[in-house]
Image: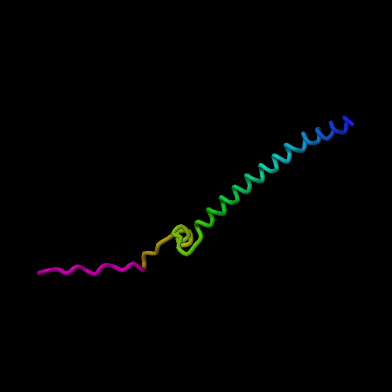
Amino acid sequence: MEEASNSVVDIVIIVAPIVGVIVLVAAVGLTMFVTMARKKRATRGTYSPSQQEYCNPRVEMDNVMKPPPEERLI
């Protein structure tokens, strides 16, 4: 009878740390996933300057209106 209880204790000693490590890795992975999801959500929306800079990094200067010539007083 003691051999059966000893084998159960041995199995618990082996399995408990493995399950603990799996739970810890799952918690860290879930935390990282939530953090990444929040960062991505922060850059999405109706107005996002960073998204506009990513899509249109260059400002075209051809369409800029030139100022009218200054009037000269005689």
Report the front residue among 13 and 5.
Answer: 5
Report the front residue among 67 and 33.
Answer: 33
Q: Which residues are magenta?
A: 63-74
Report the front residue among 71 and 10.
Answer: 10
In the image, residue 51 sits, relative to residue 20, either above or below, namely: below
Residue lying furthest front in this view? 1
Q: Position of residue 69 (x, y in %)?
A: 22, 69
Q: Position of residue 74 (x, y in %)?
A: 9, 69
The secondary structure that dominates the magenta segment is loop
Q: Position of residue 4 (x, y in %)?
A: 87, 33
Report the front residue among 12 and 58.
Answer: 12
Q: Is 21 displayed left or right of 12 in the figure?
A: left
* Picture colour scheme: rainbow
In the image, residue 3 sits, relative to residue 25, either above or below, namely: above
In the image, residue 10 sits, relative to residue 31, either above or below, namely: above
Counting labels gives: 0
Image quarter where the N terminus lies is top right
Q: Give the residue drawn at x 87%, y 30%.
A: 2
Q: Give the residue drawn at x 70%, y 39%.
A: 20
Residue lying furthest top in this view? 2
Q: Give the residue drawn at x 33%, y 67%.
A: 64
Q: Position of residue 15 (x, y in %)?
A: 77, 38
Q: Give the residue drawn at x 58%, y 51%.
A: 34
Question: Is 54 contained in the magenta span?
Answer: no
Residue lying furthest right in this view? 1
